[in-house]
Amino acid sequence: MFSIHMGVPEMEEFWNSLCSKAKSGTASKKEQELYAKMGKTLSLLSSNPRHPGLHSHDIEALTKRYGMKVWESYLENKTSSAWRIFWVYGPDKADITIIGLEPHPNDKKDSYRKITLSNM
């Protein structure tokens, strides 16, 4: 089992806001759907980051840019601009830190150039 952490400040703020809206009933339909998909993905990541449904794989362009191995996992599949979650192992051995959430880039050439990630 891995402990899941949110990157700071962006992912932590985003996740806290999404949780608050979902729990208070003020989330839009899209926010509620994203909250459910993220919850399922985080659960799978914590139990097995290599779960087949996550399609986890490292992203070489982001690994080079950030100086640590950056992984991408699917929140959804077979959907245009499907959501992807970006994460790293750490800061401790049994930790995973979520450092980004983005729709899958559509352009093939240098598609990860536009992605900005949170700090651990």
Image (cartoon, rainbow, N blue to C red):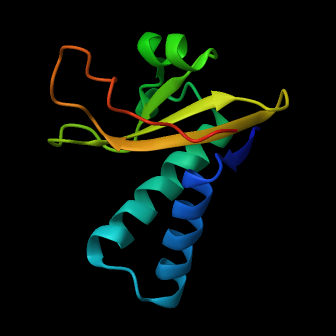
| Camera-side residue of 6 and 116 | 116
Image quarter hosting the N terminus: top right
Horizontal and vertical percent for residue 78?
19, 37
Name which quarter of the figure residue 13 lies in: bottom right
Residue 20 in percent (x, y) is at: 56, 79
Q: Nearer the viewer, residue 42 or 16?
A: 16
The answer to which quarter of the image holds residue 73 is: top left
Vertical placement of 92 versus 36: above or below? above
Q: Nearer the viewer, residue 26 or 14?
A: 14
Q: Residue at x 51, y 89 (%)?
A: 24
106 relative position to 47: left or right: left
Q: Position of residue 67 (x, y in %)?
A: 62, 14
The extreme right residue here reads 92
Q: Is residue 20 left or right of residue 34?
A: right
Corner quadrant of residue 31: bottom left
Could you say which is closer to the camera, residue 115 or residue 50?
115
Question: Residue 106 at x, y = what percent?
Answer: 16, 30
Residue drawn at x 31%, y 79% is: 28
Q: How many marks?
A: 0
Q: Determine whether, in the image, residue 107 is placed left or right of residue 35.
A: left
In this rendering, the answer to whether 10 lies above or below 92 is below
Quadrant of image for the C terminus: top right
